[in-house]
Image: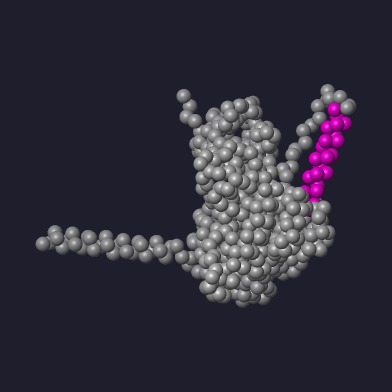
Amino acid sequence: MKGLSLTLTALLSVGFLSIGLAQSSEEALKPVTRTYALKNVTIVAKPGQTITNGTVVVKDGLILNAGQNVSIPADAKIIPADSMFVYAGFIDALSNAGIPKPEVRPGAGGPGGGGGGGQRPTGVNPGTPPNDLAGIQPELRARDLIKPAEKSIEDLRKLGFTNAHVSPIGKMLPGNSALISLGGTSADNMILKDNFAMISQLVGAQGVYPNTVMAVMSKFRELYKQAEQAKAHEKMYAANPAGMVRPEVDRSLQAFYPVLDKQRSICFVAPDLKSVYRVLAMQQELNFPLILGGLRQAWTLADQLKGKNVPIILSLDLPKMEKKEPAKKDSTAAKDLELERLEKRRADEMKLYETQAAVFAGKGINFGFSTLNAKTADIREALRRMVKAGLKEDQALAALTTTPAAMFGVAQSLGTVEKGKIANLVVSKKSYFDEKSQIRYVFVDGNLYEFEAEVTAAKPGAAGAGKGAATSDLSKFIGKWNYSIDAGDQVYKGVISLVDEGGKLDGSWTGSDGQSKPLSKPSLKGSELTFSSSVNMGQDIPLDFNITFDGAKFSGKVKAGDFGVFPVEGSKEPRD
């Protein structure tokens, strides 16, 4: 009996202990307080308005107060942010953050969304393919696709972005966008504005109609007219169905109805100059509400766009700056002159990309920024390059905060550091646009995210820096790595071979065709490898790889010219 009593006591003790641990675990998930204070900070309340030696108090997800001589609640947690800068959280005006790449039917085609080419999918009439294969799914909602755990959300948050206008991923008509918060555990809790815009782009399908730019434009016009007819039929049937055929349900056409009613805009992704011209022509013909998104080459159209009063979203995907190679002493004068001319053309073209934002701002055109196709590691540098090329810091800040807040109709709750607004904040050690600035804290809906201060590696030859102190241990990377590139409707596989060439990483890669090509300008920084190459698919398509190693695996992205950016992953082959 005594043994039974001891056993029962032990079981009860374990049971109560388990309950206690469970309760403790649940409580540990909740912050001790949702009241925070940032003291003695420089508050950039909005572009052009700065408060020095200020205090910002956050309580229950809102800005309780911001300014000088602000009282701090007794339960507030003081954040060590003395002398730091506080900004309103940044808004990515067009992004795929949180949207995983969709699974598509087995098909074929070249890498990316450029349209055209590729093998024809089997068992499908290429002239009348199903909508999903043709890239026509305007009825899809970003809200139903968002995955809060997607790494892209965290990556943007580390850059100071707290909100994003996100689009489904696809071809011609991938779906409807949503303005979301870059924090939260469920898509529903992240939504600020659902079904904000219909997303479209002049990107064709592979192997089926519409697979060219002109075919996409023709199909778009056809769908728009069909939607007008279907909507009119439904209205007439609802008024008096007698003697009328019951309208067919077509979700793709019904998705156009809010656009026809001028209640929803079409956000057209138009990165190049020709695309902008074509989209403007279709908008003038069909008269739909328009947002121009992801503009990379529209500097010559600044005056025309100003007159149209169309919301503008400029791309942060700037061309990569190439380091100049020192001229060889034995080169001829003619070759030197030709090289000099080539470098000047490159520099002039680069300047056009870098000054585009300054040109638009100079014309008085408001715009937001898009991270579509931009590498996360290059975004802050792209902003600094634009500022260096003439864009004022206040103008850049407006494009990240107040302009997109107004564009999406949320200026009353986002975009500035003011009492009563959502506590979406960025806290950096210096001015955000300073090259040495580091983000230390980000608040999303009042929830604190803290980031470690970066430690700058010692330069080779500096005091205390041993040989190779700022470089990676090459032995971890040498060998053969199997890779696969997910191009949506086809997966491309091959091998990347890395070798040690006198303390520098070099190598080659083999494409799906089995042909080997050398790596161009390979650069290894820590565990991040970048290199360039090209692939011939009727024309030479430049490829830019950016991969990050994690033990015996790697993941990253490859940019295939103007065809798009695609995920790549791989693993190391075991040595014999």
Q: Which of 79 and 572 lies nearest the eye of the viewer?
A: 572
How are the residues colored? one colour
| Whether residue 169 is situated above or below residue 485 in the rendered picture | below
Residue drawn at the location 74% of the way across and 39% of the way down:
322
What residue span does the magenta drawing correspond to?
A: 335-356
Residue 497, image x, y percentages: 57, 29
Residue 423, image x, y percentages: 60, 68
Residue drawn at the location 33% of the way across and 64% of the way down:
20
Q: Quadrant of residue 96?
A: bottom right
Q: Quadrant of the N terminus?
A: bottom left
Q: Is residue 339 magenta?
A: yes
Q: Which of 172 and 225 lies nearest the eye of the viewer?
A: 225
| Whether residue 80 is situated above or below residue 99 in the rendered picture | below
Residue 454 in sight in this render: no
Residue 422 in sight in this render: yes
Q: Which of 195 and 154 lies nearest the eye of the viewer?
A: 195
SS assignment for the magenta stretch, majority: helix
